[in-house]
């Protein structure tokens, strides 16, 4: 089992180039190309920033990151497009697919619209799929959540339950459209499911993961084994379905809440946690 991690939180401290190099030297097998800095959100619409991925030479930037990874012995396994997704954001989502392909990634995670039906989200994905196929990149949708101020915990959003997730996959029904399971989202109170149930329901459709820990209430994005999620049955379920993707961490708040001087140590701790999960899978 190969391990990977998102680089966005690291890059906010030291930049993407040094982030890829650090992830490699720490012992990860791959890096997740986080493209959140490409856009900001204004009135629910994605607008470009001054980040290199939003500029004219964005493909050159992606190629440079790919080469840094290869020079240090690792690859880009997947990416995460900017969000929120919507029909008005299709051009930026296509750019994310391009960046993924140029960096060598195989899967681009593109959020569904939280409150969109399977049919409504399928229409957005249908617009993206021909472009994704041209670039040999699969699109992965992800289980989402909304927040109930009244109940003070999460509530339903697109793909949040096994039924909804499979309904979204069925609505598109394409080999280039797969599932990315966010372990933390599945374990939040109010999701009315859990990661094990989701894994077994998705089966062979599950091709990517976002792994992090939480308190079973908030979307904490912390390092595995630090909070309340029990990873033993989760890894067992992944083994049972013969999951063949990467173990990709999305423990971004663990890095965000650290100072710059501790980043190398934090990345090492993330690597150790990811390797522990991988060893559990191989046992």
Image (cartoon, rainbow, N blue to C red):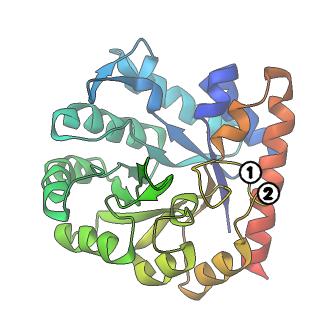
What is the x, y in percent for residue 56? 32, 15
Where 187 falls versus 134 (above or below)?
Answer: below
What is the x, y in percent for residue 16? 60, 26
**Residue 107, quarter of the rendered image:** bottom left
Q: Residues within 10 Å of mark 2 (few under 14, many from 20)?
A: some
In this view, the mark in front (1 or 2):
1
Q: Nearer the viewer, residue 144 or 99?
A: 144
Looking at the rendered structure, the number of numbered marks drawn on it comes to 2
- Compared across the picture, whether 204 is left or right of 222 comes to left
- Compared across the picture, whether 138 is left or right of 223 comes to left
Q: Residues within 10 Å of mark 1 (few under 14, many from 20)?
A: many
Q: Nearer the viewer, residue 64 or 207?
A: 207
Mark seen at residue 273? 2
Q: Which residue is mark 1?
A: 223
What is the x, y in percent for residue 157? 34, 58
Q: What secondary structure is marked by label 2?
A: helix
Q: What secondary structure is marked by label 1?
A: loop
Image quarter of the N terminus: bottom right
Q: Nearer the viewer, residue 282 or 236?
A: 236
Q: Nearer the viewer, residue 137 or 184?
A: 184
Image quarter of the C terminus: bottom right
Q: Are marks 1 and 2 in contact (CB under 8 Å)?
A: yes
Mark seen at residue 253? none
Where 95 falls versus 41 (above or below)?
Answer: below
**Residue 195, quarter of the rendered image:** bottom right
Which residue: 59% across, 78% down?
238
Which residue: 81% across, 65% down?
276
**Residue 210, quarter of the rendered image:** bottom right
What is the x, y in percent for residue 33? 52, 39
């Amino acid at each position: 089992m190969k391990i990977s991690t998102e680089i966005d939180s690291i890059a906010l401290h030291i930049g993407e180039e040094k982030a890829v190099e650090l992830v490699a030297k720490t012992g990860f097998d791959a890096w997740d190309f986080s493209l959140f800095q490409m856009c900001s959100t204004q009135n629910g619409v994605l607008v470009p920033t001054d980040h290199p991925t939003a500029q004219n030479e964005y493909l050159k930037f992606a190629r440079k990151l790919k080469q840094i990874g290869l020079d240090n012995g690792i690859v880009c396994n997947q990416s995460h497009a900017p969000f929120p997704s919507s029909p008005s954001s299709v051009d930026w989502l296509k750019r994310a697919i391009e960046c993924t392909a140029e960096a060598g990634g195989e899967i681009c995670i593109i959020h569904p619209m939280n409150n969109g039906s399977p049919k409504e989200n399928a229409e957005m994905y249908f617009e993206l799929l021909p472009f994704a196929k041209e670039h040999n990149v699969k699109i992965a949708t992800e289980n989402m959540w909304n927040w109930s101020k009244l109940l003070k915990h999460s509530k339903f959003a697109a793909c949040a339950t096994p039924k909804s997730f499979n309904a979204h996959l069925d609505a598109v029904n394409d080999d280039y459209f797969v599932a990315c399971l966010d372990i933390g989202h599945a374990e939040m109170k109010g999701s009315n499911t859990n990661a094990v149930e989701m894994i077994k329901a998705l089966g062979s459709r599950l091709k990517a993961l976002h792994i992090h820990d939480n308190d079973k209430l908030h979307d904490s994005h912390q390092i595995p084994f630090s909070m309340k999620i029990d990873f033993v049955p989760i890894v067992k379920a992944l083994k049972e379905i013969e999951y063949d993707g990467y173990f990709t961490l999305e423990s971004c708040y663990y890095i965000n809440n650290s100072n710059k001087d501790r980043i190398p140590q934090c990345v090492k701790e993330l690597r150790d946690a990811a390797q522990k999960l991988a060893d559990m899978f191989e046992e």
